[in-house]
Image: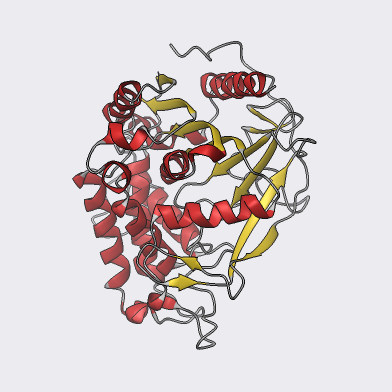
Amino acid sequence: MSEYAGSFASPGVSVGKVEKLFARLAEPPGVLATECGAGLGPVTLAYETYGRLNADRSNAVLVCHALSGDSHLAGYYREDDPKPGWWDLMVGPGKGLDTERYFVVCANVLGGCMGSTGPGSENPATGRPFGATFPVLTIGDMVKAQKLLVEHLGIERLLAVVGGSMGGMQVLEWAVRYPEAVRGAVPLATTTKHSALAIAFNEVARQAIMTDPAWRGGDYSADEPPSHGLAVARMIGHITYLSDAAMRRKFDRRLQDRCEIGYTFEADFQVASYLRHQGQKFVERFDANSFLYLTKATDYFNLENAWGGGSLTAAFSRALARFLIVSYTSDWLYPTYQSKTMVQALKKAGKKVSFCEIEADFGHDAFLLPSERLTSLISGFLATLAREEA
């Protein structure tokens, strides 16, 4: 059990109404140099903040989102919003990320499609959307853009960086790329490099988009996107986020709106209807090219090669942060053995690390669902960092 496990924090209340903000960074003659060799500038990052930055600017926590997430971490934009931000259960007064104690920041990643510069943004050189001419991105490029935002906000050192899945990759990158800027790192349900299985699922999802005739080599209009391909890509991805137990409990083999086999190619089964619904919802809010770029960035991510010459211990030797690593028993996309590999490398590197495997049958997405254990772990970890900082 982690040393940070403790009593369950108060469920807390909502942060209330929030506003999406925009930072214009890497203004000419400055440029954000991407790892593929291309330069981007100016760059816009959409972001939101919750709570207040204290006088010595020591209470800032950066939250990094997963593939399909965005900067809308908590609260609501309008009173009639159908649902709050994607981690509202963790962010707010009295919650795991207590906004009465911490200044919480979340930005839409570079390459995203929720207000940050990405493939759908206008290329200043042509006046048209970048499309597939947008530079190939890495997790490192996303973190470099976030570092510019953190500096823009007047923050030299983050109390912690927290994130799950692709967000967890960003946490790991922050810890080794900018060791002096991070006191604590909380990677959740993540990995230091994709397995062949994870790459394979991403490739099939990308092919679903690129073989949609409407993709047009990435040069599609906003009015005629490759909707079918993107919906199928989301369906493929969504399967990897769940678990056999969760799907069996929720759907099993139940038929949809019928009690007999219909021998059609409609969504006869409830699970099929659910996946089609998830695919359609995704098309309404996400850009197909962004999906291609972000999944490719996760496939390229390899912490040990990028920073350790093939040694994960050498890569983690760069870090100065205290780590809290969390995995889930039913996560077959990033299984617990991958988190244990991180823990072993960190210990060999002489770093402070705590680890907890949480029993949950919800699959990879478990870190997004209510969990007394996770709330308690994060709350305790941040409190320890804050005491050490004082």
* Quarter of the picture holding the C terminus: top right
Q: Nearer the viewer, residue 106 or 262?
A: 106
Please, which colouring scheme is shown?
secondary structure
Image position, residue 338 (x, y; %)? 28, 31
Using residue 74 as the reference point, say whether residue 70 is left or right of it: left
Image position, residue 2 (x, y; %)? 46, 14
In the image, farthest residue toward the bottom = 126
Q: Nearer the viewer, residue 148 or 318?
A: 318
Image position, residue 16 (x, y; %)? 77, 42
Q: How many marks?
A: 0
Image position, residue 221 (x, y; %)? 47, 82
Relative to 166, residue 354 above or below:
above
Q: Nearer the viewer, residue 336 or 370?
A: 336
Residue found 50% across the figure and 39% down from its top: 163
Residue found 51% across the figure and 78% down from its top: 222
Can residue 94 be seen here?
Answer: yes
The answer to which image quadrant residue 333 occupies is: top left
Residue found 70% across the figure and 49% down from its top: 154
Can residue 264 be seen here?
Answer: no
Using residue 51 as the reference point, say whether residue 337 is left or right of it: left
Relative to 126, residue 341 above or below:
above
Relative to 259, residue 299 above or below:
below
* Quarter of the picture holding the N terminus: top left
